[in-house]
Image: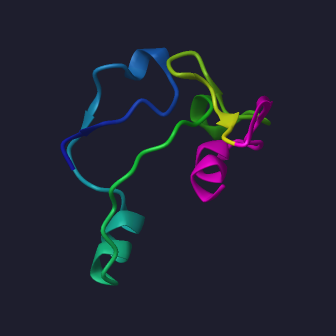
Amino acid sequence: ENQPSTLGLLTGIGNIVKEDAPMINVLRKAGAIPFVRTNMCTLGLDVESYSMIFGRCLNPWNSLRTTGGSSGGEGGLLA
């Protein structure tokens, strides 16, 4: 709620969402405390996590590799 969200779109820069996504509400009710945000490719429609806004997500153990997949930002968090 009241956080910037671009969905990887250049036109999304400056977009502030007015409410949390339904899944965030479910997680909060279960006791989760969301505290991080990650990068994603444009609309989640690519095979790697590259954004024209934030660049490419890189593997934290080997920066010559990506974190992989359209949700690679999450993969970088888990590594």
Magenta-drawn stretch contains 68: yes
Q: Where residue 72 sits in the image (x, y, percent)?
A: 67, 44
Q: Nearer the viewer, residue 8 or 78?
A: 78
Residue 33 vs residue 6: left or right?
left
Q: Name the one closer to the observer, 61 or 48.
A: 61
Residue 21's place in the image compared with 55, above or below, is below
Judged from this view, the residue extending furthest toward the front is 61
Residue for point 50% across, 17% down = 53
Q: Quadrant of the C terminus?
A: bottom right
Which residues fall within the magenta stretch? 61-79
23, above or below 69, in the image: below
Which coloring applies here?
rainbow
The residue positioned 79% from the left and 36% from the top of the image is 47
Q: Quadrant of residue 6?
A: top left
Tell me: 39 left or right of 76. Answer: left
Instruction: Return the x and y of residue 46 as percentages of the image width and height.
Output: 74, 33
Residue at 63%, 39% (x, y): give it: 44
Q: Residue at x 37, y 74 (%)?
A: 27
At which x and y percent is residue 64? 81, 27
Drawn side of residue 60 relative to residue 31, left or right: right
Front residue of 53/45: it is 53
Quick check: 17 above or below 78? Answer: above
Q: Answer whether residue 73 is magenta in the image.
A: yes
Where is residue 57, by image quadrant?
Answer: top right
Q: Which percent across, then down, holds residue 37? A: 42, 45
| Relative to 21, 64 lies left or right | right
